[in-house]
Amino acid sequence: MTDIFTAFFGSEAEELYLLECMSYFMIFMAGTTFIALLFENVPYGRYSSSKYGFPVNVKFAWFVQELPAFMLPVYLVLGTSATQLSQISNRFIVAMYFCHYVQRSLIFPFLIRGGKSTPFASFMLAIVFCVYNGYLQIRYLSQFAVYPANWVTHPCFITGCVLWLVGFLINIHSDHILRNLRKPGETDYKIPVGGMFEYVSGANFLGEIVEWSGFALAAHSIHSAAFAIFTLVVLSSRAVAHHKWYLAKFEDYPKSRKALIPFVY
Ligand SMILES: NC(=O)c1ccc[n+]([C@@H]2O[C@H](COP(=O)([O-])OP(=O)(O)OC[C@H]3O[C@@H](n4cnc5c(N)ncnc54)[C@H](OP(=O)(O)O)[C@@H]3O)[C@@H](O)[C@H]2O)c1
C-alpha cells in the first residue's frame, strides 16, 4: 500500500533523503519559531485573537487537527512492505508514538472543559504540523530505521523509554489537574495545585518535553531529535508565557513556583 511513496520518490534512497531534509527543515523552523515567540505567543487558548482568523470550536479543533497525527501513521504502519516493524525496537518506539496520539487525538479533545476557541490560522498550522510530523516519524520508523539487534537493552533505549513514560504520565496528570479546575460550564482561570504544578507553572508542558526527549533518545535519529527540539521550543515558550501571565493575574500566586524547570527556571 505505502509502496506508492517509493513509487512517488523513485527509490527508497530518495525518500530517505527527503525524510532527512524534512528533519533539518523542522530544526530550522524551530529556530525561526523561537525568534517569533520572543515577540508573540502562539495564538490559542488564553492568547486567542480574532486577528488570526475566525474561531473554531475548541473540541472540534483539537480532534480534527490531531487526527492526522494518528490516522496517517496507522496507514503507514498497516501498509509498509518493509521488515522493520518485525523488529522489537521499532515496534516499541512506534508504540510509544501511538500511545501519545491515541490519547491526544481520540481522548483529550472530548475531555476539555470550557476551553477558548482556536483561531483558524492556528488550527490550520496544527493540521500541517501533524501531517508533516506523523509522516516524518512513522515513515522513518516503519520503513527505514535499523537498530542493532540488542538495542532494547542499550542504556540509551532504556533511559529514553523511562523518560518517555515519566513525561507521558506527568503530561496526562497535569492536563487532568487543569481540566478539573473548572466545574462544567465555567471558563475562568484558577491557580493550579497538586502534582508537578507545585513546582512549575507549565507542568503539562514539562511532561510533554520530557516525553518527546525520551522518545528521541530511544529512537536515536535526527527525525525524532527534530521533533523533540521543536516541542522544546514551542512548549518552553508557552510555559514561560503562562508563568508571567499567572504572576500578573494572581497576587497570591505561589512565589517559589518556577516556569518550567523545578527549583531552577
Ligand atoms: N508537542 C507539541 O508541540 C504541543 C504543542 C501544543 C500543545 N501540546 C500539548 O497539548 C496539551 C494542551 O496544550 P495547551 O497549550 O492548550 O495547554 P494549556 O494552555 O495549559 O491549556 C490546557 C487546557 O486547560 C485549560 N486551562 C489551562 N490553565 C488553566 C487554569 N489556570 N484554570 C482553568 N483552566 C485552565 C485551558 O483552557 P483555555 O483554552 O480556556 O485556556 C485548556 O482547555 C498539553 O498537554 C500540551 O503539552 C503539545
Image (cartoon, rainbow, N blue to C red):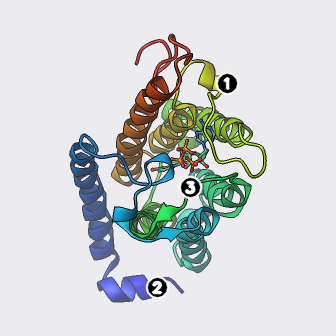
Please identify the quarter of the rendering in which residue 121 is found. bottom left
Real-space CA distance between mark 1 and mark 2, rounded to the nearest whole angstrom: 50 Å
Asked whether 12 or 58 is in front, the reply is 58
Residue 3's tag is: 2
Q: Disc 2 vs disc 3: which is toward the camera?
A: 3
**Residue position for label 3:** 116
Which amino acid, by three-letter code, is at mark 3? Lys
Q: Residue furthest right?
A: 184
Of marks 1 and 2, the one in the foreground: 1
| Image quadrant containing the N terminus | bottom right
Q: Amino acid at mark 2?
A: Asp
What separation in Å lies between label 2 and label 3 (alpha carbons)?
41 Å
Let me know if residue 28 appears in the view: yes
Q: Position of residue 6 (x, y in %)?
A: 38, 83
> Picture coordinates of residue 214 (x, y %)?
51, 38
Classify mark 3 as within 8 Å of ligand 1 or not, answering yes or no.
Answer: yes
